[in-house]
Amino acid sequence: MRSNGARPKKAKILVAGHFAAGKTTFLRTLTESLLDTEKKIKHEEEKKVKETTTVAMDFTELITDDGTKLHIFGIPGQERFSFMWPILAKNTAGIIYVLDSTDEKYWYQLFQQINMFRKISPDAVFIFAANKQDLPDALSVEEIRKKMKLPDWVKVVPLVALDRESVMNAIKTLLEEIERKKAAAGTA
Ligand SMILES: Nc1nc2c(ncn2[C@@H]2O[C@H](COP(=O)(O)OP(=O)(O)OP(=O)(O)O)[C@@H](O)[C@H]2O)c(=O)[nH]1
Ligand SMILES: [Mg+2]
């Protein structure tokens, strides 16, 4: 119970992004008891990339230092499971679009997701997270920004989804962006 009578803050955030970007890894780094829906991949092309894929969602909760309770959902990256995207996107305060900095093959899927999420949650704040920065062939944030033609106002953070500090930095950046937007709208 809070002594000042203020209600604890809550927020729903989404970890979105293309196939094999590292969304499930991101959530798994945050918790030992991840609710996941991993299934074996049957399609030959994707099987070359990895063995399992998210078919519905990942979920965990996180309480931040200021007491905000975050409900964090990871989306399935593959378009064949995109029926889950509108379900997961409802009432989302913010979205982290994770991409694989070492492989541009699936980046186009991000733009499909952005278009869809903009329609369902037009007020959701979003940032990009350039994942797999621990790998030697990872493009830098600046290179990715240029290749994707991202405007200056879009935040892009470097990410190693295997590293808790890096994951927490991405979440912190998103929460700061959400607060900034609220302050600008006079609703903080
Ligand atoms: N080196 C390195 N590998 C990573 C990192 N993040 C994820 N991976 C690897 O990338 C692969 C894909 O990770 P997932 O977390 O399953 O990707 P996903 O985005 O959840 O994929 P879908 O749910 O199938 O769309 C796995 O082999 C991970 O171990 C990272 O920061 N560094
Ligand atoms: Mg996944």
Image (cartoon, rainbow, N blue to C red):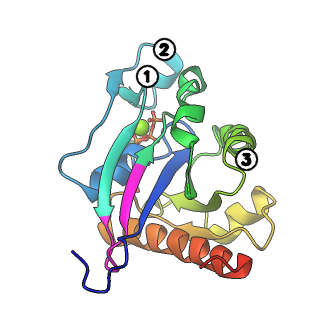
Quarter residue 4 falls in: bottom left
Disc 1 packing (10 Å; few <14; some 14–19; many ≥20): few
Check if mark 2's residue and mark 1's residue have beta carbons within 8 Å. yes
Q: Amino acid at mark 2?
A: His
Q: How many numbered marks have been drawn onto this rendered protein structure?
A: 3
Q: Is residue 40 above or below residue 107?
A: above
* Residue visible at 46% across and 60% down in the picture: 11
Give, as a single range, the part of the protein colored magenta. 63-72
Question: Which mark is on residue 43?
Answer: 2
Please name the residue that numbered disc 1 is placed on. Answer: 47
Q: Amino acid at mark 1?
A: Lys
Q: Is residue 12 left or right of residue 33?
A: right
> Circle 2 — which element?
loop
x and y, in percent, of residue 42 in the image: 42, 13
**Which part of the image, by quadrant, shows the C terminus?**
bottom right
Indicate whether residue 20 is drawn in magenta: no
Q: How far separated are the C-alphas under marks 3 and 2?
A: 29 Å
Question: Which mark is on residue 18?
Answer: none
Q: Is residue 102 above or below residue 78?
A: below
Q: How far separated are the C-alphas under marks 3 and 1?
A: 31 Å
- Front one among 110 and 182: 182
* Residue placed furthest toward the bottom: 4
Please name the residue that numbered disc 3 is placed on. Answer: 118
- Front one among 120 and 100: 120
Quarter residue 117 falls in: top right
* Residue visible at 54% across and 77% down in the picture: 176
Q: Is mark 2 within 8 Å of ligand 1?
A: no
